[in-house]
Amino acid sequence: MPPVQSGFKRYLRAHWPQTLRSKMIFLAIMMISLPTMLIGYIVEVQGRDALLQEKQIKLFAVTHLLDRALSDSFELYPNLPREQRIKALNERLSPITDDITSAFSGVGAGYYNKELDAIITYAPQKLYGNAVGVTIAKDHPGRTVMASGHPLVKSGSQVRGNIMNAMKPIERGGQIIGYIWANELSNDIDRQALAMDISIIIVIILGMLCSVLLIVVFSRRFASDIDTIKTGLTELPLNLNTRIPPLKGEMGEISDSVNALSRALREAKTLNELIIENAADGVIAVDTHGCVIMINPAAEGITGYSQKESIGKPYENVFGDRDYRSPILDTLERGIDHVALEVDYPAKHRTIQISVSTSQMHNAQGEIIGALVIFTDLTAKKEVQRRIERAERLATLGELMAGVAHEVRNPLTAISGFVQILKDTEQDPQRLEYTQIILKEVNSINKVIQQLLDFARPRPGLYQKIYLNQIINQTLILVKTKGIEARINFNVNLDPSLTYIDADGEMLKQVLLNLLINAVQSISARGEIAISTQPVGQDKQRIKIQDNGCGIADEIKDKIFTPFYTTKPSGTGLGLSISQRIITSHDGDITLESQPNKGTTFTIVLPVRNGERNPI
């Protein structure tokens, strides 16, 4: 097959109407346009022929009038020389030709004398009088008329130009003594023909546009009924309660049949299907090709994927992930069943922890028809376990640190007292300097011990109604010293719609102060710290503290809240641990996001409890 023909077929296949409505419109347009254009063409051809015929009749009518008016004038002035005779005949006949042609706009006419072999008149005289006396060419059609004695119509380039020329021989006494012509410029004829063609084309276009408009209007209603039925049939496998609205005519009969089918299917549902639909655990089934054939409402809620997004699609495309090996596909491919397998599952909007059990599905003949997975969301349970384990670890660590702090503080008190006595009695400047250094280091140790005691035995919270925006502003006063404000820009965006919450304001100040100091210390030169608040739903509020400092490496993010872990040479590693403990005691959550050399964001989420709208 030639490449051009193959390319045309591909183009035709790609642009051929696909929907029923488009096919109907295309077919109707073809049925209307082809006969209309054919009729228009025939009318145009016949109209042009009629126009030309009418022109010929008019021109021959002019020649007949000129022939009648000529009489025997060519016999006059026989003795005059040729030039003088032509001039005399012109003076006699030109008023006649001018008078006759004035009644026919655009027509030129005249006499040709065979004996004199010259044009006698050419009217209108004022336009074509300069042609008088001219001899026509040897191949001029006028010579054919004089030779044959028959009228002739000829179109083409002649004396006047591009014309339609009607020529009639002048016969007197059985002799051809010349011929008469009447002509009209072809441009005038073409203009009239073009005007007629334009009128025909306009009528055809208007007719086709009206026809197409009517087709589109009527097909829209038809296509709307079809779309309604298609939508209902698409939703029927997902929801047997789907009902197609009543329609008219044959479409109504189809919709009634579909509604009757859905009603029969609803009544035919088995008890097992109802149990699966109402089960608290998620259930998903796939066929032998790995395509999802069933997903119950609990599975939709856990995974975040609806039936429309999953039914009929490959399981790995909907629920899969490059780093996730699906147990149900493993069961389908290798026949290995899994029982109570705990996995991290990539749901639609988050990664969750689930307990999975899978098995193959068999039909009545024992043939494998797919696989089934039943799973439970363990995310909330795991989170509770994580919080309990963390609290137990912190409690154990707190008891240990409390004992260590108590045993260390007593000797330190004695050391501090005796060194103070030595300082008061010492006269040697060098030894006096040593005693001051000892006292300074003892105070540092005491400070660390106090932090240990605060971590081990946190004081009971004094819960009252507080306004988070006010707590943040009070904390910023402590942080914004003159030196810090000179190099750090604080961008504060506090949502005025926040409500009051039940919390310990002083403890939250301690958390905010720890986070802000860490943010300031992470910025080596100039930088920015953004603090914002925002409601989360109706029962939570969020605080974000974001800096563009040095950031935190990925390998130490998991250790950042661990007690005694620090990256600062003089740090104790207790600030973030205490902050996390305070937020946890408020039933809140604190998280971080960080990228090295790009900055760190701490996010605190606190419950509102019985909050009220801030009246200010």
Image (cartoon, rainbow, N blue to C red):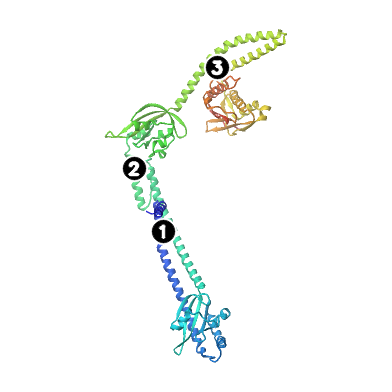
Residue 243 visible in the shown view: no
The disc at residue 456 is: 3
Kindly state the secondary structure of the residue where label 1 is placed: helix
Expressed as whole percent of the image width and height from the top left, the position of residue 131 reads: 55, 80
Which numbered disc flags the more N-terminal residue, 1 or 2? 1
> How far, Cα to Cα, is label 1 from label 2?
41 Å
Expressed as whole percent of the image width and height from the top left, the position of residue 416 reads: 64, 10
Kindly state the secondary structure of the residue where label 3 is placed: helix
Residue marked by disc 1: 29
Report the residue that reaches farthest toward the front.
Answer: 138
Q: Amino acid at mark 2?
A: Arg
Residue sitting nearer the eye, 479 or 500: 479
Work out whether 444 lies above or below 179.
above
Q: Is residue 289 left or right of residue 584?
A: left
Image quadrant holding the C terminus, namely top right
Work out whether 393 lies above or below 523.
above
Residue 511 visible in the shown view: yes
Q: Residues within 10 Å of mark 2 (few under 14, many from 20)?
A: some
The disc at residue 92 is: none
Residue marked by disc 2: 263
